[in-house]
Image: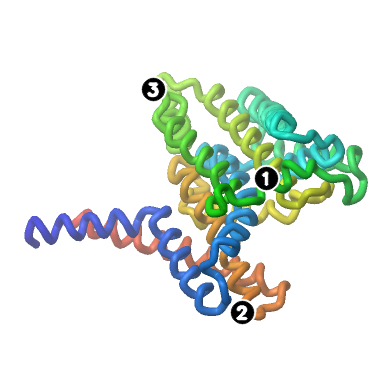
Amino acid sequence: MSTINTRRFSFSRDVLTNGVSTVVILYFILYAVYSRIETGALTVSAFSDLVNNTIPLAIAAAGATFVILLGGFDLSVAGVLSLVNVVLATHPLDGAGGALISILIAMSIGAAVGLCNGILVAYGGLQSIAVTLAVMILTRGLALVVLDAPGGGVSDWVSDTLTNNLWGVVPAAGLVAIGVALLWAIFRRTNTGVALYAVGKDETAAALSGINVKRTKCIAFVFAGALYGLAGFMLSAQTASGDPNAGATLMLLVFASVALGGTAFSGGQGGLYGSMIGAATLMLLQKVLFSSGVQSFYIGLFQGFVMIAAVIFVNLITYFARRSHGHD
């Protein structure tokens, strides 16, 4: 094989074995289908609606990715989303200043829950799935105490501004997701970001290399919780009301988004970008199925099928790429 062909093959292999690249390709395929079956799918309003529906799930999936990169699992996402939603719906704050305070409250609630998870898992030595399951039940219980039935409402400024388009073109909610992506790009290059991957790949080796494993785990849970809080804020802006079970419908989709985006549940491989695009792909799939006339109780079946197919595809490509690499 010539040098040029070898480079082309290597480039193709890298693209195909990258979870982000695979889910991006899938997204554009689905959007092409969506544009064929839905009139006005390419309009600004249709795109804005899709972004607004996607952002809460995308940010929640980004948060879960922090913990999954460690090889852990965080079920508290559903409880945090619900708790933040009802707190904001029962204590609306108007205006830009009120929105900023609401964001800080939401992220503080999430970070506090994440800190509890992190202390119990990292320093208490407890299993993440057991701890976060208990915390999910606790936070959902607190949500019911705050608001025992759907109701309440967020401020008109928050619901109108964050679901609208800036300059008539750019979805305001999309800027929040871009902000999260930019912060991840910075974090990924910090010592803590490097430590996160090292701990996920091999906790023992990471400890022997001088990484503070317990601190890294705790920070990951705190960051995850803060993003859950932000997702709860964006969900509240979208629904404009409170529901103590608001997070329940998103929990499975959060982990499906992470898996679809190429993050390994064994830890140490993947990232926020894939998870966020995975969330966008799942929400777009819902749109495609609705537009195709598929009944709602079949949508979960199709989403599961697409997720499994995508994960199998990535694993097969990775397997053959590694075999071919061994023959280079």
The circle on residue 16 is none
Measured in 3D between alpha carbons, the distance from the residue under mark 1 to the one under mark 2, in whole angstroms, is 31 Å
Look at the image and tell me whether residue 298 can be seen.
yes
Mark 3 residue element? loop
What residue sits right under mark 3 in the picture?
A: 209
Q: Is residue 23 left or right of residue 107?
A: left
Does residue 82 appear left or right of residue 197 in this picture?
right
- Note whether 59 is above or below 1 in the view shown: above
Q: Quadrant of residue 46?
A: bottom right
The amino acid at mark 2 is: Ser
**Which residue is painted at 43% across and 44% down in the image?**
269
The amino acid type of the residue labelled 3 equals: Ser
Nearer-N-terminus badge (3/2): 3
SS at mark 2?
A: loop
CA gap between label 3 and label 2 equals: 54 Å
The label nearer to you, 3 versus 2, is 2
Mark 1 or mark 2: name the one nearer the start of the chain: 1
In which quadrant of the rendered view does residue 291 lie? bottom right
Residue 281 rendering spot, x and y as whole percentages: 53, 61
Circle 1 or circle 2, nearest the eye: 1
Amino acid tagged 1: Thr
Nearer mark to the viewer, of 1 and 3 = 1
Mark 3 neighbour density, 10 Å: few (under 14) some (14–19) many (20 or more):
few
- Residue 56 vs residue 241, the one in the foreground: 241
Q: Which residue is mark 1?
A: 161
Q: Up-down: is 306 above or below 243?
A: below
Which residue is the site of mark 2? 292
